[in-house]
Image (cartoon, rainbow, N blue to C red):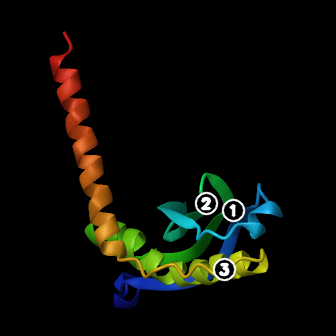
Amino acid sequence: MSDENLQPVFQIQRVYLKDLSLEQPNSPSIFLEQDAPTIEVALDVGATPLQDGIFESTVTITVTAKVKDKVAFLVEGKQAGIFEARNIPADQLDPLLGIGCPNIVYPYLRANIADVITRAGFPPVHLAEINFEVFYQQRLQAIAEQQAATAEGTNTVQ
């Protein structure tokens, strides 16, 4: 093989909005409420191999706004990217897909979420920057703890 074939390759093929939904179960009465809403944000990251050296990376955000006990709105968005990642060592590929790709995809999702909330008649929710490296490490730790608990459970069963 030539040296060119062994060089690491990482390219963005496409970034796209995969899913976006908005629910306003208490409209229009919720617009008459005077209290400030409480905002809850949930985050998930995923990566799926599509073919040899081609991966889809997704970032999913769910934003729920409540006034007292009533849901003002619920927005769920999933932004995705297709990435080419070839000749990358196995120990570097998982962090690339779990940290690098979400860092590329997330700003698009953040803008789409703010836009749909504004179009729904609410003040925009400006989502904070996310440290995907910390998120990635937390996920690895949770998986390790779950595997350890499962191993303990199987060792004690007789």
**Quadrant occupied by the N terminus:** bottom left
Give the residue type that dot 1 points to: Ala
Query: Picture quarter containing residue 20?
Result: bottom right
Where disc 3 sits, the SS reads: helix
Query: Which tag, 2 or 1, sits closer to the chain's start?
Result: 2
Q: CA distance from mark 3 to mark 2?
A: 20 Å
Of the residues tagged 3 and 1, which is closer to the observer?
1
Callout 2 secondary element = strand
For the residue marked with disc 3, what is the amino acid? Asn
Neighbour tally class for label 1: few under 14, some 14-19, many 20 plus, Cα within 10 Å:
many
Looking at the rendered image, the quarter that the C terminus falls into is top left
Considering every residue shown, the one lying at the far bottom of the view is: 4
The vertical placement of 104 against 38, above or below, is: below
| Front residue (pair 100, 112) | 112
Looking at the image, can residue 51 be seen? no
Asked if labels 1 and 2 touch by Cβ distance under 8 angstroms, the answer is: yes
Residue at numbered disc 2: 66
Q: Is residue 102 above or below residue 28?
A: below
Q: Which residue is mark 3?
A: 112
In x, y percent, where is residue 70? 66, 54
Residue 111 picture location, percent across and down: 62, 84
Front residue (pair 80, 20)? 20
The residue carrying mark 1 is: 72
Farthest residue, direction right: 28
